[in-house]
Amino acid sequence: MNEPPDKSDPPAAMTRAEFLRRAAGAATGLAAVLATVALGRHAAAATAATTMQTRPIPSSGQRLPVIGLGTYQGFDVAAGSAEYARLPGVLQALFAAGGAVIDSSPMYGRAEAVTGELLAAAGSRPKAFVATKLWTRGRAAGLRQMNESLRLLRADPLDLMQVHNLMDWRSHLPTLRDWQAAGRIRYIGITHYSAHAYAELAAAMRAERFDFLQINYSHDEREAERLILPLAAERGMAVLINRPFGGGGLLRRVRERPLPGWAAEIGAASWAQLLLKFVLGHPAVSCAIPGTGRPEHMTENAGAGIGPIPDAAFWRRHPLDI
């Protein structure tokens, strides 16, 4: 009987031609793999250079685009007016850039109604993260206002309901918790716009769990850096920034000044983008919501969320003398 071949025996000697053929094939395969990896990296870099950055909401992990839209004044306009006619373009610019957050309030006149009308007309409600505010006293009044806001915004469920300026927040919180449990609102938050209220705000943040904080913060209003922003990070709160241009005065002050030469290094083509990148440079900040009623300004603002967002060390090396 013939014995089976011993698999431990060495194979027959490979000819030089066979060796070179196999080596060439392996080199070709390796080159193809490396080319694919390089192409993938290039595509990823290109995508990162043209896509708005996002940051997670700590309480859920949902990612939020870093530039949104405030509707104060800009959306408080009459139907049929020239100002109203521009607003569909504002929302288109927000969504085209990868943005989602739209922040409103019953205090902003027609802003809630206009926002709801425009989102419904365009069929773009699924693209939006819609936030509004509660600004009244007493449980019954709070219920009426919240129901009216959801009706005007045509957003039931609503993404975010915020107690504005901490007004009667202890009375409203049980209702907000009930609505969140029932699925009528997804997130709960509190807001303020003045450093004078920071002590009261910090006490509320420590006393209760909130998903969101909305606060003022800009290059010339930096008080929130001392306590409020670190506390928000500690308490696991997403942070929306109102007044990122200091109420508009900051932009007016620098409008005629040339941009620093290093602005191009971080992809800032305007003062608006540079100042928004400064705000986003704080690690506790989730999204800045500058208000506008003009499509070109929305496009410009959204550009701040694309490309590099420098950290605090960068701004120490490149202080803005404004």
Image (cartoon, rainbow, N blue to C red):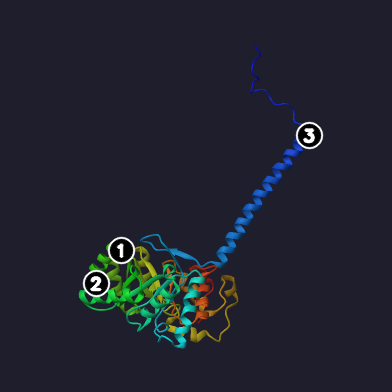
Disc 2 marks which amino acid?
A: His
Which residue lies under the disc numbered 2? 172
Residue 80, image x and y in percent?
Answer: 43, 87
- In the rendered image, the vertical position of residue 46 relative to residue 193, given as above or below: above
Disc 1 marks which amino acid?
A: Gly
Residue 113 occupies quadrant: bottom left
Earlier-in-chain disc, 1 versus 2: 2
| Label 1 environment density (alpha carbons within 10 Å; few <14, some 14–19, many ≥20) | some
Residue 190, image x and y in percent?
Answer: 31, 72
Which residue lies under the disc numbered 1? 183
**Circle number at residue 16:** 3
Query: In this orientation, does residue 223 appear?
Result: no
Circles 1, 2 touching at the beta carbon (< 8 Å): no
Image side of residue 21 versus residue 111, left or right: right
Of residues 260 and 104, the one nearer the viewer is: 104
Disc 3 marks which amino acid?
A: Arg
